Amino acid sequence: MVVSYNNYQQAKFLTSSNGISGYFFENFIGVFQVFDLKKANTELAEENAQLRTALQHYQLRGTNNSRQGYLTERNPLIAMTRDSLNKIVYFFTTAMVINNSINQRHNFLTLNKGRIQGVKPDMGVVSAGRVVGLVTNVSDNYSTVISILNERWKLSAKIKRNDFFGSLSWNGKDYRKVQLNEIPYHVPVQNGDTVVTTGFSSSFPEGLEIGIVSEFTLGSGSNFYKIDVNLAVDFKSIVQVALVENRQLKEINKLESLNNDGK
């Protein structure tokens, strides 16, 4: 009654109720915006994965001026011929990180895709084109990834500026840094050098970024540098990753197994 028959109280009540309802609507809409943003990020990641695959198609074409195979659809893979698809070595697909550790000596990630979605052991895992780890175990709908922050894993890596390569590993100390080993002392190294994959590992294409040289020293009596590399990936904020499938991996492993057997 006070509100209905008193203009001042009515105005104050309406102002207060609008403020309260506005607060709830703002937060309610905010929840939907979070879901919309997540959906947009997922779609963007999937499109980036398709484009990374498609990029190999255009690199394979070289100086071929034929217009056949140009992008004509939202999905760039649709525009490719069967022949060009057969020539592509690496295919990219996306997954979400549902578990991640960084404070152990042997760190792993868990992804929300598995065997049913086409995930296989030894697939490379990257985030925005930067190395994250390697798929180790796969169930029907999930997979685990050995992180680059794992003392048991080593990766072939090189200094992008001069192509000198070595073995990259983690010493178990700082989750932001890994170590590049076996670079001889006569190689020109400087802070700020970019470290990338060599392509020697069949799980990763050549040239994927790993990090930036932050410090290097020459050990007493050693012919090799001790090089610290600041990781390009922030392992505390990984949400979306891309899985790298090498379609020629089975053939490569079969061939290399002949050497191991001494044949």
Image: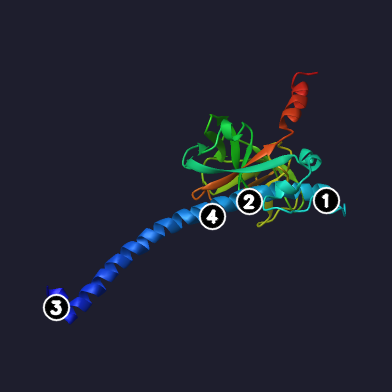
Mark 1 residue type: Gln
Residue 212 place in picture, x, y as percent: 64, 53
Cα–Cα span, label 1 and label 2: 21 Å
Q: Residues within 10 Å of mark 2 (few under 14, many from 20)?
A: some
Cα–Cα span, label 2 and label 3: 60 Å
Name the residue: 64% across, 53% down: 213
Query: What residue is disc 4 on?
Result: 40
Q: Residues within 10 Å of mark 3 (few under 14, many from 20)?
A: few
Q: How is the image coloured?
A: rainbow
Query: What residue is disc 3 on?
Result: 5
Corner quadrant of residue 243: top right
Query: What residue is disc 1 on?
Result: 68
* Residue 122 in sight here: yes
Mark 3 residue type: Tyr
Marks 1 and 2 close (CB-CB < 8 Å): no
User: N-terminal of the two: label 4 or label 1?
Assistant: 4
Name the residue: 61% across, 48% down: 46
Farthest residue toward the left?
1
Residue placed most toward the observer, 7 or 263? 7
Marks 4 and 2 close (CB-CB < 8 Å): no
SS for callout 2:
helix
Residue 38 place in picture, x, y as percent: 49, 53
Mark 4 residue type: Ala
Q: Which circle, 3 or 1, is nearer the viewer?
A: 3
Cα–Cα span, label 3 and label 1: 77 Å
Corner quadrant of residue 7: bottom left
Query: What residue is disc 2 on?
Result: 47
Residue 160 place in picture, x, y as percent: 73, 51
User: N-terminal of the two: label 3 or label 1?
Assistant: 3
Q: Which circle, 2 or 3, is nearer the viewer?
A: 3
SS for callout 1:
loop
SS for callout 4:
helix
